[in-house]
Image (spheres, rainbow, N blue to C red):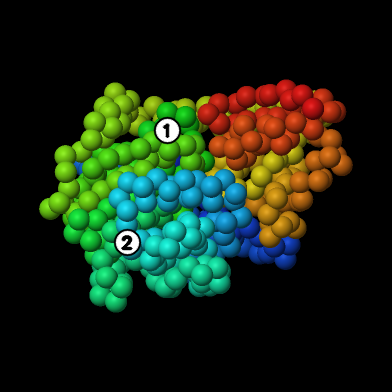
Amino acid sequence: MNCRLCGSTNLASVVDLGATPPCELFLSADQVDEPEMTYPLHLRLCTDCLLAQLPPLITPEETFTEYAYFSSYSTSWVRHAKDFVDAQVARIDPKFVVEVASNDGYLLQHVVEKGIRCLGIEPSVNVGAAAREKGVPTVTEFLSPETGAAVRAEHGPADLVVANNVYAHIPDVVGFTQGLRALVADDGWVSIEVQHLLTLIELNQYDTIYHEHFQYYTVASAQKALLSGGLALVDVELVPTHGGSIRLLAQPVENAGEPTQRVADVLAREKAAGLHELAGYTEFARRVAGVRRDLLKFLVEAAARGRTVVGYGAPGKGNTLLNHCGIRPDLLAYTVDRNPYKHGRFTPGTRIPILPPEQIEVDKPDYVLVLPWNLRAELTAQLSYVGEWGGKLVFPIPHLEIVEVKP
Ligand SMILES: [Zn+2]
């Protein structure tokens, strides 16, 4: 196995989470009696370039050509995107904006509103169609050096290229970065948002490791990934999405200025956490095992005492947790989700039924295990009614917490 960024064969194990199915492949009722493919979920670190990575066992073409996730369903995402557009327009006054993995136009709609020319590049046919319907010009493509060059030839270079929540999802990180360089003007900007490996490690967010995320970045490794396509990191911002992300602002190497103090500050934090060498990663697997033990101990004891436990949410990352811990309906009777697509379906691998959220008020369980822990504040308020019958909320990550809620 070779590092996909530098080609090195020096890949060290960070954590082995066993074999799991793709985390978004929720099963319909008639699929639960059929066989299900699982793939090893083993995170490794390249000790030469420090890119943390999973082998590309499932291609993005399999995941994203027909995709069920529409970003505009989430009001907090749309607001986050609007704030971003306002700030970037004020900062660099772009005349042409390109977004890669533009989804349903949740971000570019704010660029259209300002009367600025833009183009979305989105691989999912159905999601891109939704963007065009709301007036966001969108082409159906995966970004590569060739498709990037073709877009530039037809539409001209972009003053701003945005790539949010996609830089982890592409196994060909070098080709994708070259594609970004092909799109951007020689004096333009590339802005990338991606989960930060520092918070993943520090806060035990191991359930955000799944097959659709091929690599996990520190600012140090992101800098090297950007350079592989001719881009230099100029500035970085810490943003709260996904439990802790970085926004990387880069320019073509030949025109990039010196990196800001903020880049130096985040690099210093990573170095202090040991993440610029293998040593900083070696305790992680032990802490992950601790999260699993504590959660299982709680669920087994609750079952032994005759207490009822149900889940809240069926996010993709919940499936890494459920599969790694081996939690099945004997320990978690069902989970609920607001997305009607998931109702009547079952979690991949663990086959836990997914019901509408109203079921919680009907059954009044003793405990509700919250799987999207990254929305903790929002969900604690939303689920306060559980306190009416003395029920408690359970958060598994960063470590097991049982929380009383007041109605
Ligand atoms: Zn490497």
The amino acid type, in three-letter code, at marker 1 is Thr
Q: Residues within 10 Å of mark 2 (few under 14, many from 20)?
A: few
Classify residue 146 by image quadrant.
bottom left
Classify residue 322 by image quadrant.
top right
Q: Position of residue 394 (x, y in %)?
A: 67, 30
**Tag 1, which secondary structure?**
helix
Going 28% across and 32% down the picture, which residue do you hit?
Answer: 262
Going 16% across and 39% down the picture, which residue do you hit?
Answer: 258
Horizontal side of 10 relative to 28 (left or right) equals left
**Tag 2, which secondary structure?**
loop
Residue 199 image label: 1
Q: Earlier in the sequence, mark 2 or mark 1?
A: 2
Q: Residues within 10 Å of mark 1 (few under 14, many from 20)?
A: some
Horizontal side of 343 relative to 362 (left or right) equals left
Q: Position of residue 27 (x, y in %)?
A: 66, 60
Q: Quadrant of the C terminus?
A: top right
- The outermost residue toward the left is 254
- The outermost residue toward the bottom is 154
- Marks 2 and 1 sit apart, C-alpha to C-alpha, by 35 Å
The amino acid type, in three-letter code, at marker 2 is Lys
Residue 95 image label: 2
